[in-house]
Image (cartoon, grey):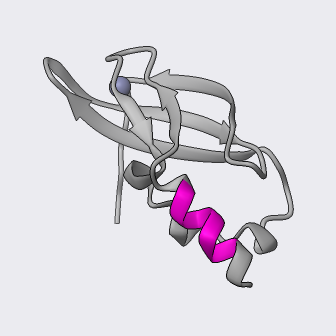
Amino acid sequence: METNRTETRSLVKKLLAICPHCKKQIYGNDIDVSKIDINKIRNWPLPYIYCHSHENYPMHALTMYLDANFTVRAREVSDFITIQK
Ligand SMILES: [Zn+2]
């Protein structure tokens, strides 16, 4: 598993995507890639929802579909978010 850990470390600095809405650059570090255990993911691409506000843009959600190499295959932005706990 040592190789996986090294990969995760380099992913932290990887530019995954640029939000099409606010143009924020999203790095592995922003979505905490270390929380994702790729060995436990059965269905790729993995939808990852990243909520953020950036500069003059209010909070919005960017869904990134990640493949097993953490390359973003597709992106989707939504301005409508409700998070209930
Ligand atoms: Zn954005």
Task: Give left or right: position of 23 versus 38.
Answer: left
Location of residue 12 in the rendering, given as x and y in whole percent from the top left corner: 47, 55
Q: Observer-nearest residue: 1 or 61?
A: 1
- Provide residue 75's location: percent of width, then percent of height: 60, 25
Above or below: residue 23 compared with residue 4: above
Report the label total: 0
Determine the image quadrant of residue 65: top right
Query: If the image is split into quadrants, where does the N terminus sit?
Result: bottom right
Q: Residue at x 69, y 38 (%)?
A: 71
- Residue with the most extreme left position: 56
Q: Nearer the viewer, residue 10 or 64?
A: 10
Q: Which quarter of the picture shows residue 11? A: bottom right
**Pick the front one: 16 or 36:** 16
Majority secondary structure of magenta residues: helix
Position of 58 compared to 39: left or right?
left
Where does the image place residue 85, in percent across and percent down from the top left? Answer: 34, 66
Q: Which residues are magenta?
A: 4-10
Residue under the image location 21 percent in, 28 percent down:
54
* Above or below, comparing residue 57 to residue 48 in the picture: above
In magenta segment, residue 31: no
- Residue 58 location (% of width, % of height): 20, 25
Q: Tell which quarter ligand 1 is in.
A: top left
The residue that appears at 36% across and 41% down in the rendered structure is 51
Q: Is residue 8 magenta?
A: yes
